[in-house]
Amino acid sequence: MQTLYRRLLGLMPRIGVQVTDLGPGTAVVSRRGGAYRVTGADKDTWVLRRTRDAARSEVSEGDAVRLGDTGALLLMETPGGRDERRLQLAAAEYLCTQHVAAMLELYGVNCVFDVGANNGQYARRLRKLGYTGRIASFEPTSETFARLEKAAADDPDWHVYRCGLGREETTAEIHVGWKTMNSLLPASDYGKGRYSRFAKADTEEIRVRRLDEVMTEALDGLADPRPYLKMDTQGYDLEVFAGAGERIAEFVGMQSEVAVLKLYEGSPGMGEAVAVYEAAGFGITGMYPVTREATTGRVIEFDCVMMRADAAPTP
């Protein structure tokens, strides 16, 4: 059953209030150009907070966190018992998606290559953030691809491809049953110690294509292609990148999940991956933690967003 807090958040858009849900008990609520004011917020921001008494909801500034001088406030449902690690990761995901959306708009991106699409979560998020251009999603495993294909069925500018991408055209065995962490690489000892799912040994044969080979098809019909490359392939991003060959120069920006602590055998470290991307002309515009160790606080992986500065619009 939905809590009163959640029902009220759901009603906010009907009265012109934007709600960004960062996870359980945490949201940013704002309204532009409105006549309403709330204690502790500026003229553009509403904050709705559920008190410790779950039976009632009220506005309060006591546990709202001001986000710098932006006028936005972060709303806590039960501040006393919040999980700071989960909160930080949720906030990082929110900031990353907002940053990516801003870069796509700034650079005039009209085709996003969504490599490692899984069920289509990334593409759906782009649509919610207002991106209306083409999306080309790549997912190799049969069961997951079926869900991806269903997700894209009613979106005529969202194209899906059942294949993996890599350095060469081939077939390969991918580890399956690892949920969102299916990989062409075996799990490292560190990965096995962290995730019990890696104990499964099921594999599936998949087709692997080169990125430069699929680009012509994916960009067909675009008069002035300005593509963006997102990679989330569980340790295989550099192989995908290599498969673009000289055509990597056509991408105005990219996004890669880079590892500080390696979950997969043979995967590159963050320094190695970033050096390759920088050598190809991309510069970092944002780094956002994806996962952390609960016991030490160490970041395991970052989402690294990079853009080609010479592709930026002239001021």
Image (cartoon, helix red, strand yellow):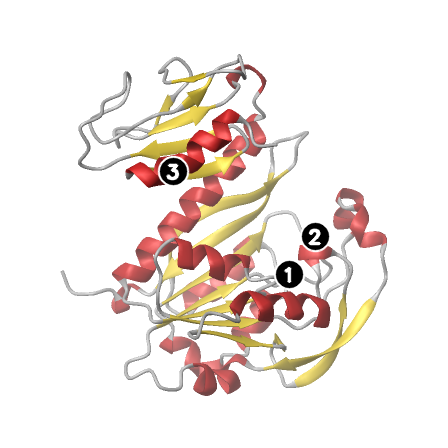
Crowding at dot 1, Cα within 10 Å, few <14 / some 14-19 / many 20+, comes out as: many
For the residues labelled 1 and 2, say whether their Cβ atoms are less than 8 Å apart: yes
What residue appears at the point 59 percent right and 68 percent down from the top-left corner? 150
Question: Closer to the camera, 243 or 232?
Answer: 232
Residue type, numbered disc 3:
Val
**In the rendered view, would you say 52 is above or below 149?**
above
Residue type, numbered disc 2:
Leu
* Foreground: disc 3 or disc 1: 3
Crowding at dot 3, Cα within 10 Å, few <14 / some 14-19 / many 20+, comes out as: some
Where is residue 193? Give x, y as percent.
Answer: 80, 44
For marks 3 and 1, the one nearer the N-term is 3
Which quadrant of the figure has residue 29? top left
Dot 2 corresponds to which residue?
263
What residue appears at the point 58 percent right and 18 percent down from the top-left corner? 81
- Residue 29 lies left or right of residue 290; in this view the side is left
Marking on residue 158: none
Residue type, numbered disc 1:
Gly
The Cα atoms of the two marked residues, 3 and 1, are separated by 34 Å
The Cα atoms of the two marked residues, 3 and 2, are separated by 35 Å
Q: How many marks?
A: 3
For marks 1 and 2, the one nearer the N-term is 1
For marks 3 and 2, the one nearer the N-term is 3
**In the rendered view, would you say 3 is above or below 192?**
above
Which element carries disc 2, helix, strand or loop? loop
Dot 3 corresponds to which residue?
19
Query: For the C terminus, which image quadrant?
Result: bottom left
Dot 1 corresponds to which residue?
235
Question: Closer to the camera, 271 or 11?
Answer: 11
Question: Is residue 274 visible to the viewer in this orientation of the structure?
Answer: no
Query: For the N terminus, which image quadrant?
Result: top right
